[in-house]
Image (cartoon, coloured by chain):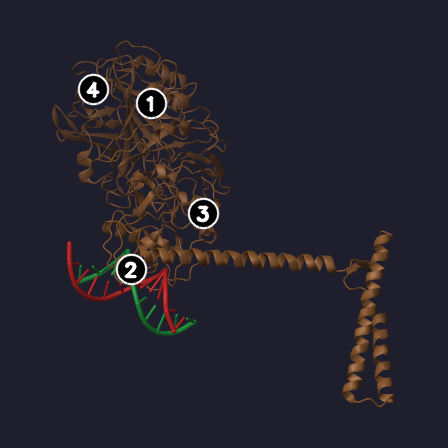
Chain colours: A brown, B green, C red
Amino acid sequence: MDVVSPELNSLLPDEIMDTEAMEKVVPSQPDGTMGVKPEPLDLTVPMETDSSSETLNICSDVAAPQPALSTDSPLTINPGASSSVSMASSMPSSIITLKPLTGPFTISAANHQIILNKVASSQATEAGRGAGTTPQIIKQDGQKLLLTAIGKSVQPFVLQLPHTGSKPVVSQAAGDAKTQTPQFKVVTIGGRTELKSIVGNAGNQMSTLQAQHLKTVQITKKTPVSSAAPIKFIVTKAVNSKGPQTSVAPVIAGRVLTQTSPLMTPRTITLTESHNTSIPGKKIAISPLKTPSKVTVVSVASPTGNTSQKSVALPVNVALGQQILTVQQATPGSPVKVVTGPSPAQNIKPVQPVAVGGVSSSQFKTIIPLATQPNVQQIQVPGSRFHYVRLVTATTASGPSTTKPMSTGAVRMSVPIVQAKTVKQMMAPKPLPSAAHVVTSPQTQQRLIMPATPLTQIQPNFANLPPGTVLAPAPGGGNMGYAVVPAQYVTQLQQNPFVTLASSSAFPPLTGVQTQARLPLNGFPAPESTSRPRKPCNCTKSQCLKLYCDCFANGEFCSNCNCNNCFNNLEHETERLKAIKTCLDRNPEAFKPKIGKGKEGESDRRHSKGCNCKRSGCLKNYCECYEAKIMCSSICKCIGCKNFEESPERKTLMHLADAAEVRVQQQTAAKTKLSSQISDLLTRTAPVMSSGGGRLPYTFVTKEVLEATCECLMEKAKRAEQTRQSQAEAERMVLEEFGHCLMRIISSAAKAKTDCDSVNC
DNA sequence: GAGTTTGAAACT
DNA sequence: CAGTTTCAAACTC
C-alpha cells in the first residue's frame, strides 16, 4: 500500500535511510563462527487484534554516512537448527528483505516497532544482558545486525555484516567515542515495551542524543502473495548527534523506502514475512486520501498485557500525510521506560519534521490508538474550520497465529498537537504539564492527551488535512487503535483542551452532546462568537455533506438541526469522508476559514475569496462579508457594493442596527426591571402571617371576614328593598357598603400589622 | 409559515 | 474559466 504518493515520495530527500551501509549480514555466533544458535529465539510479538501496522525503526548512532551496503547478498539469520530468520536481500533490484522464517524465531506482524539500530557489538551485548537477554554477537568486521525483541525474554541476534568501505565512527552516548563496528539492531517491540533492555543499558543505551535525531522512513512490508494487504513500516533512523554531522537530521515521514545510493540505483528495502502467510494485511501508515491532504496514521499498538500503567516514552514516528506524527505510547505493565535516561523529557528532543514538497512544519499531529473496528475513527484537524481530520481505518488482523489476546490494559497516549519545541514535554512519561489533562475513558481505558495549545498555532500545518473525522474507538471495546483526535470534539464534549476517548459505546451518542463550539479562526474569534450557539441547519437535499450546509462547512456534525436525510454524523462516516475528500479535491482550502487576517493585522479581517454579490449591495446577510461584519475588499467581485467604509448606506444601516440593538437592550432591561419590581412588590405586600403554620397572603380576608362582609351587603340590600329604592340605587348602596367593608378590612389589616410589628411578632 | 430573493457552491 | 444549476440561508409578506 502506498502511503505516500509517488510524487511526494520523489520529493523526499534520499538521506532518509542510509541503507548503503547495509551490505551483507551474515549470521554468526559471538565467537565469530558461523553457526547455529542452540536455543531458539522467540521474536514473536504479540499480535494486536487490530494490528494494522508495524513500525520499523532503523536507528543509527553512526553520525557519518554509512558505508554503502550491498544488498546483493541475502541476509540470513540462523538462530537455530529448526528456526531461522533471514534477511534476504533480493538485489540486484536493491531490495533488502527481512524474512522471519518459521519457528519461534519469528517477527510478528503485529503493531510493534522494529528497530534497526547500529550499535557497538560489545555494547550491544551488554545491552542484551542488561535486559536479561543474551545477544548473539558476531565478532566480525563489518556491519552487524542485532535482532531482538523488546519486552521479550529472548535473545537478540547480532548479525555481522561484512565490512565494506570505511568504518563509520560510532559515538556512544556514554561517551565511548572509540571506533565501533556498527551493527544493525533489529528490535521488535513485544508484549512489553522494554526497550530499555535493549538500548537502555549503561554502555549501550540509546542515548538521548541519539533519540534527538530521527529519520523516519516508511517501508512497505510485503507479505507473501497469499497474505493480505502488505504491511508498512516506519523506519526510523537515529543519528548520533555526537557524530561528525552538524546538521540535525529532520524527520521525514511518509516515504516509501526508496533510497538512492551513490553506488547503486535507488533501491527499495522491503520487509517480508515468509513464514506467516496467514497474517492479514497490516499497515502502519494508512491514508484515506491520496491527495496531499491525506492523513496517514500509523497504528502502533502496544500489547497491554498488564493493567498497570507504567509509562512509556516510546516515541513513535508516524507518517501523517507529509508530516511526522510523534506519539507517546504508554505500555501498561512495562516495568521500564522505553526511552532510557534519567530524564527523557529533558533529553529527548522531538523529531523535527522536514520540509517536504515545500511544506515545512515544526509541529505534530495527533494520533490516537485506532480501534480495532474501523468505521468510527475520527480525527481532529485543529486549526482550520474543519477541526478534525478523518483517519483511515486500520485493518483488523484476522487471526494470525501470532495474535495474542489483548488485555484490558490501559493505553495511555500522549498526543501532541503542539509545536515541536513542546513535544519533549509530551514525550516524557512524567506528570503532564499543567496545561495538559489526561482523561481516561472508563471503558476502553484509553487516554488521550490533548494540548491546550491554541489551535491556531497548528492551523497552517493542518490546512490540507481533510476534515470530518471523529475519534472513535472501535465498538466492542477494542483495546488498541489510534486515531487523530478531533480537537473540536474536545471542545464539543467538554469544553476542555483535552479529550476523553470515549468508548465505542459511549462515543456514538456524541452527536447528542455536541455543542458545536467554534474555535478561533486565524487567531481571532470566529464571526460567530464561540458563546453563540450554532444555528441549526435546514438542509434537505445536500444530506449535509456539501458546503451548502453550514455545519459541514464548519467542520461540525449536525446536532439539533432540522435537516433531512442528514449524513453529517457518525453513522455515515464513510459518506462523510467521501464528501470531505470531494470538497478538498475541489478546493483544498474549502474548510479553511473564509475570514482571515488582512495584511495589517488582526483587526483588518477580510474575506479570503471576496464576495460576488450583485443585488444585495453587500448590505444584507446574503453577503458573506457583511455577514462577517467586515468591509468588502479589493478581492470582492461584487456589483453595486455599498459595504465600504464611507458608504452612507452602510453607515445608516449600522446606525439603524445599533439603534435597534440599543432598543432591544433597553427593552430587555426594562422587562428585567419590571419583573424584578413585580417580584419585589409581591414579596413586600404579601402579609407574612402565620396561618396554620403557613405563610398566607392576605390572611385578613378570612372566612369570618367574608361572611361578615356578605352579611353587611345583604343587610344593605334588604334596607334598600325596605325603603323601596330603585334597582340601580340598591346596587349602588350595596357597592358602597362593599367599599366600606373593604376599607375596614384594609384598615384592620394595617392596624394589626402595625401592632404585630410593635410587639415584634 | 409560506414564498421569494440571494449568492455561494456545485456542476457543466 | 465562465456560464448554469443547485442549494440553503436570508429575507419578505
Chain letter of the residue beneath label 2 in the structure image: A
> Which residue lies under the disc numbered 1?
A211
| Marks 2, 1 in one chain | yes
Label whose residue precedes the other's in the sequence (2 or 1): 1
Location of mark 4 (residue): A65
x then y, percent, for residue A159? 26, 20
Residue drawn at (80%, 64%) of the image: A699
Q: In which quadrant of the rendered view does residue C8 lie?
A: bottom left
Q: Which residue is mark 2?
A: A617
**Element marked by disc 4:** loop
Name the spot of residue A339 as percent of width and height, x first: 39, 23
Indicate which disc, 4 or 3, sits on the residue closer to the N terminus: 4
Horizontal side of A626 relative to A14 (left or right) equals right
Q: Earlier in the sequence, mark 1 or mark 4?
A: 4
Task: Compare residues A190 and A755 and report the one nearer the observer.
Answer: A755
Image position of A199 (left or right of A89): right
Disc 2 or disc 3, which is closer to the eye?
Answer: 2
Callout 2–callout 1 Cβ contact below 8 Å: no
Tell me the amino acid under the disc marked 1. Answer: Ala
Q: Which residue is mark 3?
A: A492
Q: Quadrant of residue A421?
A: top left
